[in-house]
Amino acid sequence: MADWRVQRKARDARIERGRVHAEGKLVAASAVVDLLEAVLLPGDRVCLEGDNQKQADCLARGLSACDPVRVHDLHMVQSGIVLPEHLDIFEQGIARRLDYSYSGPQGARIARMLYGGQIALGAVHTYLELFARYFIDLTPNVALIAGVSADRDGNLYTGPNTEDTPTVVEATAFKNGVVIAQVNAIVDRVPRVDIPGDRVDFVVEADRPFYVEPLFTRDPAAVTETQILMAMMAIKGIYAEYGIRRLNHGIGFGTAAIELLLPTFAERLGLKGKIATHWALNPHPSLIPAIESGWVEQIHCFGSEVGMDRYIRERPDVFFTGSDGSLRSNRAFCQTAGLYACDLFIGSTLQIDLQGNSSTVTTNRVAGFGGAPNMGSDPHGRRHPSDPWMKAGEEAGGTGDPALRRGRKLVVQLVETFGDKLVPAFVERLDALELARKLDLELAPVMVYADDVTHIVTEEGIANLLLCRTLDEREQAIRGVAGYTDVGRGRDHAMVEALRARKIIRRPEDLGIDPLDADRSLLAARSIKDLVHWSGGLYEPPAKFRNW
Amino acid sequence: MADWRVQRKARDARIERGRVHAEGKLVAASAVVDLLEAVLLPGDRVCLEGDNQKQADCLARGLSACDPVRVHDLHMVQSGIVLPEHLDIFEQGIARRLDYSYSGPQGARIARMLYGGQIALGAVHTYLELFARYFIDLTPNVALIAGVSADRDGNLYTGPNTEDTPTVVEATAFKNGVVIAQVNAIVDRVPRVDIPGDRVDFVVEADRPFYVEPLFTRDPAAVTETQILMAMMAIKGIYAEYGIRRLNHGIGFGTAAIELLLPTFAERLGLKGKIATHWALNPHPSLIPAIESGWVEQIHCFGSEVGMDRYIRERPDVFFTGSDGSLRSNRAFCQTAGLYACDLFIGSTLQIDLQGNSSTVTTNRVAGFGGAPNMGSDPHGRRHPSDPWMKAGEEAGGTGDPALRRGRKLVVQLVETFGDKLVPAFVERLDALELARKLDLELAPVMVYADDVTHIVTEEGIANLLLCRTLDEREQAIRGVAGYTDVGRGRDHAMVEALRARKIIRRPEDLGIDPLDADRSLLAARSIKDLVHWSGGLYEPPAKFRNW
């Protein structure tokens, strides 16, 4: 007779072995390696919580200190590859396979290790996709997560950086997995219960507070006039034109410039209340002036941001907060909101090709795309109309019965024609394709595919790809805003002028914008200090941003 | 100075008014109307938990008994419109606006009320889309939810039908909303914590256990030979051909037939372990024989199913279960899994047009589509390859650089050419378009759009729309499997034969299937009683399915 409790019994045995190193559920930081060696089995699928912001770093150090003879060939399934330990374990033979989503700081090292064959790569997912697989074919055997505090029953308080934790824990705890949490402190009673204790098997009191990455702070002092010009075009030529109220902004100075122009440039255009009211967004400090000026109705957050805690606590009408007063973020729900409930995604990229495919992957860096592929895609399952969505759908046109027409998500690439070190952003062919060839990947690491992009904004103008009717028009529309790059100089001038007459390409002057007006005086805040002022002293920027 | 706590104070005031009718958090069933009248304000957005299965019916009765002078113009935002009370409140003026996802039993009444102007319709969403909007622009002010039990602190045990509850509660509780739960019993300690008590404001001990709808039970006795033939074709022509391991099945006898053929027909084809191993699925009783035969590795569930509780408890290696042993379902995560982590969605419909658009909406019934638009769509954000997905992408072909090629989700419509009462399933134009015109809807209620459907399976054969290169080929491929319907008889015979030569149309004989073999003896279970036997007596079908 079949045994239907093989996994369940294995789980019970893991916990029993772990209990040797615990008092109840509590484990001393000094016993982490013993605990992990007791619980983990070779070949396990492990989620070592590495989020965009919050890092289970004590557990990461513990894992990298395990004996590879005992713990080896792990299959890591985690959204962020952020800490050196996340890759050290592959060099040590502790881990072998990797499925992940995003790696800012470790992108170059991942590329080297992929070339060197030290990592067997599954795929580079968008967050929501990786979470989806947690419930189907990448369910973790062990989850190593991070929180602010826990009580003795294991009830967990994540603080404002809830992020991936509920999703990881749900997939693991309810499918015979073991959940180990590191916390900064054991307390009698947690300020709020982010994760119920019956889903948590072990709690490690970490030797120091978990690491948080301030990933979403852009110093207004570094916003350039080119970025201001592009932001003006985006606001007037896209946000106002379509009436975008529900949106997501990617990371970057371009979108920070838009945020900083809302209470100034956009307010003078009479757009307050008509655009940018409902957000799926990390708590960007650069949105503070718009919030303080009454532009923003509500924001749901993927994660938090260092220094924003007090400000968020004092703005509960805007942010999602818990009974304790602090932010409740949730990456899975915020990504879902960005996919299905927002009318616009705007973000940046490193390279765009002649059809509009884009990628931030180069031959030397495999950084991953985080949420961009998800939020920068047209959700075919969407069934609720909104004005911007219907207008975009109308522009996209298409043959067939007009009664069958549906809308389109607006997906905007905001990109300067020449990026860092004057590398052109427009290319004939993405470097990602060369990387895919070299690494023999089945699927090239494209961030946003051409058929999802609707607009490209550069300092030269806006290309509205929705209005293009042929691949050739599309290519010329892209060349027409590609400036002095080779791609831009390769344009057919007559055709570009014809596209401009059809408003497929719009120059600043076509939008009634004088590039000379693109001045830093338009920024609602011109420094981090200004943001602190706007916040009434509630925003507490991390030290590296305090330059006054 | 701006007040940033308007919502928060309003919430506190609601709770204070409600407390008058409570002891701590506990409220007697007899005080429900008083509680609701105290907490609710005119114009509130309210989620009255109506899921696919679980119904907060005590609270629904309470709401419909409220005084419309005090409680009126509510905006209902809930996934299921299932109980009569869900619509009574619109007739009474208690509610005015409606945003929802699915309504099986009330579809005809909704249509009448829409025509009569009693309901101001927002949109008919797919589940995940409605959940997404909970975090952006449809955040509930008050959530009325259902659980099995609660303790005095409000910690909630949902039992196996967790379904929408965590999502609804998260959106409401963390955005200044009030959460009221009905439970079957107040207990000292809940078997597991599905919802932490600090997110629950009031707990009502209901006068009777909440209603659960057995929505996913299909009696094998009612499976026809036509459905068996179609199931054989789907298994051999699609599941085997693409190697589908990760999948979702819609509701219906067609997919039940497939489930019942896995341990027989599919096993003889040597497909065990090669197809149908990982599922996003409600716990269909018709999958029991496949599970018992060792076909299924794991299943994540949207909700539970009446009668399946004991069986699930004894199969923890297959299902997601909690520390209490019972199923933990979660509609939001399962829909996400169906979208991003499954390679195939297969379901049924009432009408398909000449391009492949489909809908279950007719001019008399607005039933909604539940998860079908979500799971029956190609997720453009997907970035992980799999063999079925890549093969489908290759078949879809397309111009441009092959290095940029990506995969395609398989979306299969399983439909008999003539449906109930011999109404043709293939039509020149969907009734949904006429309904949209009459109700002046911005967006026609299409379930799955033509560009997402990859295969249509009828008793006449399989049409592979991926291989079609023109709209004309597509139309003839559809006509070519549409049998004796007008659409089928309108086919261009020469072209259909040419499509067959190119394997775009495949008849049973092309697949090596003899229709005479499509016999009920192929079903692993031929009755509900057989399913009970297969389960070793663990499956306990509800009374209406017990016909022995």
Image: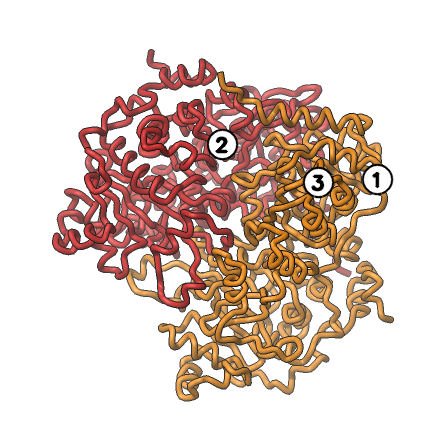
Chain colours: A red, B orange
How far apart are the alpha carbons under marks 3 and 1? Answer: 16 Å
Disc assigned to residue B185? 1
Q: How crowded is mark 3: few (under 14 residues within 10 Å), some or many (20 or more)?
A: many
How far apart are the alpha carbons under marks 3 and 2? Answer: 24 Å
Amino acid under disc 1: Ala
Amino acid under disc 3: Leu
Chain for mark 3? B
Q: In the visual, does A28 lie left or right of B325?
A: left
Quarter where residue B32 is shown = top right
| Tag 2 residue | A297
Quarter where residue A375 is shown = top left
Front residue of B139 and A51:
B139
Of circles 3 and 1, the one toward us is 3
Residue A346: x %, y % from top left: 37, 41
Front residue of B217 and A298:
A298
| Tag 3 residue | B144
- N-terminal of the two: label 3 or label 1? 3
Front residue of A297 and B55:
A297
Q: In the visual, does A290 lie left or right of A194?
A: left
Same-chain status of marks 3 and 2: no
Same-chain status of marks 3 and 1: yes
